[in-house]
Amino acid sequence: MKLVKKKMNRPPFPTATRWDRFKTRMHFLWADHAYLRLGFTNAHWIDEKMLRTNQPWPFQLKKWKEQGVKTVINLRGGASSFYYLEAYACERLGLKLENFGLTSRSLPTKDDILAAKALFDRIEYPAMLHCKSGADRAGMMSVLYSHLHLGQPIAEAREQLSFKYLHMKAGHTGVLDYMFEVYLTEVEPKGISFLDWVQSPDYDPVKLKADFKASWWGKMLTDKILRRE
């Protein structure tokens, strides 16, 4: 009888050995444009408990750990080299990694927003949240944190979506701003809270996205030049 050896299931971007980590790091460096983030973190503290940044390198996670961060919120999902390096680093550093996938071209659903509130209520602080550039998805999540956890009015919290953090309103990513503009101009004047609105049938993220019109130059900038996710 011929014995058939079972192949070990290896992740697409392994980190088990030094050679594995080197190859995964090289993919991260070039395919994820991580060379642009070696010295630039787009890091801003929202308050004393929550930091927003772009995609961190492992050595940057170590720095944030030394500054007290206990929880890392990844807004990008887990399909590429960045995630495997981050998961490896968080495990080594004793950081809690929370995966909370969002997109910058679509609006969060009711369930997404309620899940974000629950996440903010249960995680250990200080914490940091990040997407790739620290601008769009990190901006949306920062608005939700500022409003749902800190109690800031939407008109104040929405400032987390601004060019100060490299957020681009003109392109497809402007749909995130549009959501809050609709709430502030059409819903809040009726005395309806943001949380009540998103839990009502009147909140339709698909229709809001369809109603939003991005400028041609904004689309070229965010999609072709900056290549925002």
Image: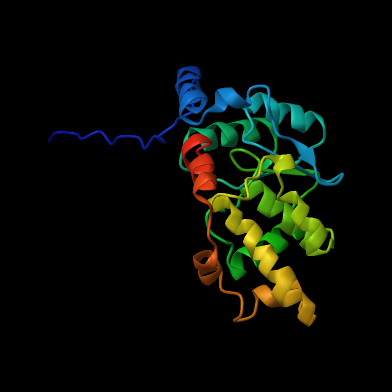
Q: Is residue 3 left or right of residue 85?
A: left
Residue furthest to the left in view is: 1
Residue at 53% x, 42% y: name it. 222
Compared to 135, does 17 lie above or below? above
Q: How is the image coloured?
A: rainbow
Compared to 53, does 17 lie above or below? above
Residue at 68% x, 49% y: name it. 139
Residue at 59% x, 62% y: name it. 108
Q: Quadrant of the N terminus?
A: top left
Q: Is residue 217 left or right of residue 96?
A: left
Q: Quadrant of residue 94?
A: top right
Q: Does the rendering let one see residue 158?
A: yes
Depth check, front residue: 16 or 164: 164
Compared to 62, does 45 lie above or below? below
Q: Does the rendering let one see residue 103?
A: no
Residue 224 placement (x, y as % from top left) = 46, 38
Residue 64 placement (x, y as % from top left) = 76, 32
Residue furthest to the right in view is: 48
Q: Quadrant of residue 116?
A: bottom right
Q: Quadrant of residue 69?
A: top right
Depth check, front residue: 164 or 85: 164
Residue 27 placement (x, y as % from top left) = 46, 26
User: Number of marks in the image?
Assistant: 0
Residue 119 placement (x, y as % from top left) = 70, 58
Depth check, front residue: 25 or 209: 209
Compared to 92, does 218 lie above or below? below
Residue at 73% x, 51% y: name it. 142
